[in-house]
């Protein structure tokens, strides 16, 4: 595992429009296509701070962040990324004010509706639906059950999600499954292995993330994909999520392409 933080000075230099376009095209051209991550996890962090910078209401920051999600998924499809996991709302975030949560839930619901409009996207909900308003939990269930016409990208939507809770839920489901099959719990404990738990994670059947990106300059996982990211590469970017640009994404991919993944060896 290797961790990279983009410096604020080198990471946020604003270029004139024509130079920016040239730089973006150069990054895209030089990016080795055989080193594109298959699965990218993204911690979409910094919406509230972005709004504060412009003296705008918090809801405007969340809406800008939601708009960035759709733009980001377009970049991923363009480059051939197959799986994206979006950390949109953690269990800790549920402690925010009811006013902010009501606005945020509505924005998330609208984001899901926009995802539903793309027949080439499949969506999988991750988290605790019982923590969410009924209308939002129902939309997540409906979207998860939908079959895409032609799947170009699979999107995991982590809403009401906590990494510790996911592991607890996996172990709980593993035990219930064992009891239903009449297995001896003591023998199960003796024989338990990593793959046994992996089979009951929210992301079961999916590849683990190759790259995890966190915006806003924070350098911690905050419970995001704690089990699955054991061998992931991490990239921390100073840009707040609504201000995350395509060149920021391409820099993250360039950095990832230059790493030698050892998987603990």
Image (spheres, rainbow, N blue to C red):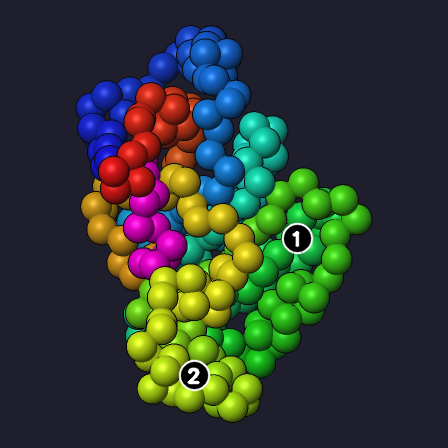
- Residue farthest along the right direction in this orientation: 149
Magenta highlight on residue 38: no
Comparing marks 2 and 1, which lies closer to the viewer? 2
In the image, residue 132 sits, relative to residue 105, either above or below, namely below
* Image quadrant where one finds the N terminus: top left
Mark on residue 248?
A: none
* Image quadrant where one finds the C terminus: top left
Left or right: 202 in relation to 228: right
Determine the residue positioned at 34% across, 43% down.
232
Magenta span of residues: 225-240
Determine the residue positioned at 45% across, 42% down.
40
18 and 29: which one is in front?
29
199 and 229: which one is in front?
199
**Where is residue 125 shown, x and y percent of the image?**
55, 64
Q: Which residue is mark 2?
A: 175
Residue 29 in sight here: yes
Left or right: 71 in relation to 86: right
Measured in 3D between alpha carbons, the distance from the residue under mark 2 to the one under mark 1, in whole angstroms, is 29 Å
In the image, residue 179 sits, relative to residue 94, either above or below, namely below
**Where is residue 244 shown, x and y percent of the image?**
40, 35
Determine the residue positioned at 62% across, 43% down.
153
144 and 51: which one is in front?
144
Q: Quadrant of residue 172?
A: bottom left
In the image, residue 34 sits, relative to residue 186, either above or below, namely above
- Magenta part mainly helix, strand or loop? loop
Q: Which residue is mark 1?
A: 122
Identify the mark nearer the N-term, 2 or 1: 1
């Amino acid at each position: 595992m290797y961790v990279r933080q983009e410096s604020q000075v080198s990471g946020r230099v604003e270029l004139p429009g024509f130079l920016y376009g040239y730089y973006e095209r150069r990054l895209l051209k030089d990016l080795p296509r055989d080193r594109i991550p298959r699965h990218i996890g993204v911690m979409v962090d910094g919406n509230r701070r972005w709004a504060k910078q412009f003296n705008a209401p918090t809801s405007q920051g969340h809406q800008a962040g939601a708009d960035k999600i759709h733009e980001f998924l377009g970049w991923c499809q363009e480059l051939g990324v197959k799986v994206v996991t979006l950390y949109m709302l953690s269990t800790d975030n549920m402690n925010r004010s009811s006013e902010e949560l009501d606005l945020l839930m509505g924005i998330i619901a609208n984001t899901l509706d926009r995802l539903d409009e793309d027949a080439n996207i499949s969506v999988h909900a991750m988290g605790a639906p019982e923590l969410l308003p009924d209308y939002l939990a129902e939309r997540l269930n409906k979207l998860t059950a939908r079959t895409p016409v032609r799947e170009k990208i699979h999107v995991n939507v982590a809403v009401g999600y906590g990494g510790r809770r996911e592991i607890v839920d996996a172990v709980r489901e593993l035990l219930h499954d064992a009891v239903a099959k009449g297995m001896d719990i003591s023998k199960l404990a003796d024989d338990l292995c990593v793959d046994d738990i992996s089979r009951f994670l929210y992301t079961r059947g999916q590849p683990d993330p190759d790259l995890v990106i966190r915006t806003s300059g924070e350098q911690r996982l905050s419970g995001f994909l704690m089990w699955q990211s054991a061998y992931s590469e991490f990239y921390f970017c100073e840009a707040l999520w609504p201000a995350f640009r395509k060149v920021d994404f391409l820099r993250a991919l360039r950095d990832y392409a230059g790493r030698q993944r050892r998987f603990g060896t």
